[in-house]
Image: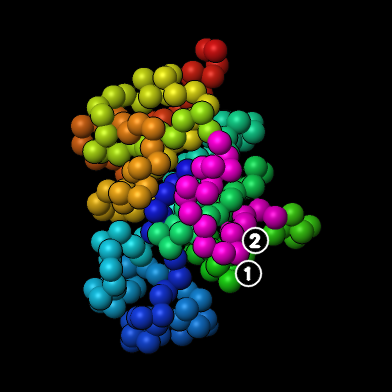
């Protein structure tokens, strides 16, 4: 699970800013149909709450690429979800092959926010977003994992190997934001929180390390 991900469409309060309208014009879309992206909207984002945690959809792209490329996922042993900053829940289909190009990914995400789903040419749902805002707590209640394990630099020091070995059948939650820590509301959902490195790691690196150790633990079981 990638939680509090910096993935959202441009919010109304800055939709009229020149940096936003100019970028939307280049894409041929309305401002509210484009992804909030610090690369283009840095000046406009200064007035947004939690600006330091928002506007980085590339983090989600890197993280999903890492998770969906693992044997755990391709062999059907891993379920992947994304919880966004704006409390939207995205469910990833078991057979999804994500575009390696960020620009194609951006287009898919814009379509997902607009239509609520991304489908294959044959009509198979590849990614689906809840029509109404949903909470992370609701998803955890629905999935009912053995444990909910947070991965954060503020957690108890451990190793990826120990975390994977001790927490089989758990939901692992990695932050999908560039700076800061999980909100208090999210932290209350964790049964335990671990830090697998003394220095902070990017989300996709944490995912790679933990899933590799999960694969090893599964083979050894």
Magenta span includes 91:
no
Q: Callout 1 environment at 10 Å: few (<14), some (14 to 19), or many (20+)?
A: few
> Where is 149 relative to 10, above or below?
above
Labelled disc at residue 209: none
Colour mode of the rendering: rainbow
Q: Dot 2 corresponds to which residue? A: 118
- Residue 131 quadrant: bottom right
Mark 2 or mark 1: which is in front?
A: 1
Judged left or right of residue 142, residue 153 is: left
Secondary structure at badge 1 equals helix
188 displayed left or right of 137: left
Q: Residue furthest right?
A: 122
- Residue 212 is situated, as x and y percent measured from the top left of the image, at 46, 27
In the depicted structure, whether residue 206 falls above or below residue 115: above
Magenta segment range? 125-144
Q: Is residue 211 visible?
A: no
- Number of numbered markers: 2
Q: Residues within 10 Å of mark 2 (few under 14, many from 20)?
A: many
**Do callouts 2 and 1 mark residues in contact (Cβ within 8 Å)?**
yes
Q: Farthest residue toward the left?
A: 198
Residue depicted at 21% across the width and 32% down the height = 198
Residue at point 57% right, 40% down? 143
Q: Residue 127 at what x, y percent from top left? A: 62, 55
Q: Which residue is mark 1?
A: 115
- Residue 133 position in % (x across, y down): 52, 62
């Amino acid at each position: 699970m990638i939680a509090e991900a910096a993935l959202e469409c441009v919010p109304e309060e800055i939709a009229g800013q020149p940096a936003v309208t100019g970028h939307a014009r280049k894409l041929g879309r309305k401002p509210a149909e484009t992804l909030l992206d610090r690369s283009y909207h840095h000046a406009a984002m200064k007035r947004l709450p939690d600006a330091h945690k928002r506007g980085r959809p590339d983090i989600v792209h890197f993280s999903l690429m890492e998770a969906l490329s693992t044997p755990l996922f391709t062999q059907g042993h891993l379920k992947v979800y994304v919880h966004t900053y704006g409390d939207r829940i995205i469910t990833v289909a078991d057979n999804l092959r994500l575009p390696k190009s960020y620009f194609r990914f951006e287009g898919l995400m814009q379509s997902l926010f607009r239509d609520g789903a991304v489908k294959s040419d044959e009509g198979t749902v590849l990614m689906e977003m809840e029509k109404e805002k949903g909470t992370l707590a609701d998803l955890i209640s629905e999935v009912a994992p053995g444990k909910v394990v947070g991965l954060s630099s503020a957690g108890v020091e451990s190793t990826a190997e120990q975390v994977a070995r001790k927490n089989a059948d758990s939901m692992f939650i990695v932050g999908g934001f560039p700076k800061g820590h999980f909100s208090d509301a999210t932290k209350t959902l964790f049964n335990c929180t671990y830090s697998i490195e003394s220095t902070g790691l990017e989300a996709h690196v944490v995912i790679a390390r933990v899933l590799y150790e999960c694969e090893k633990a599964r083979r050894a079981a």
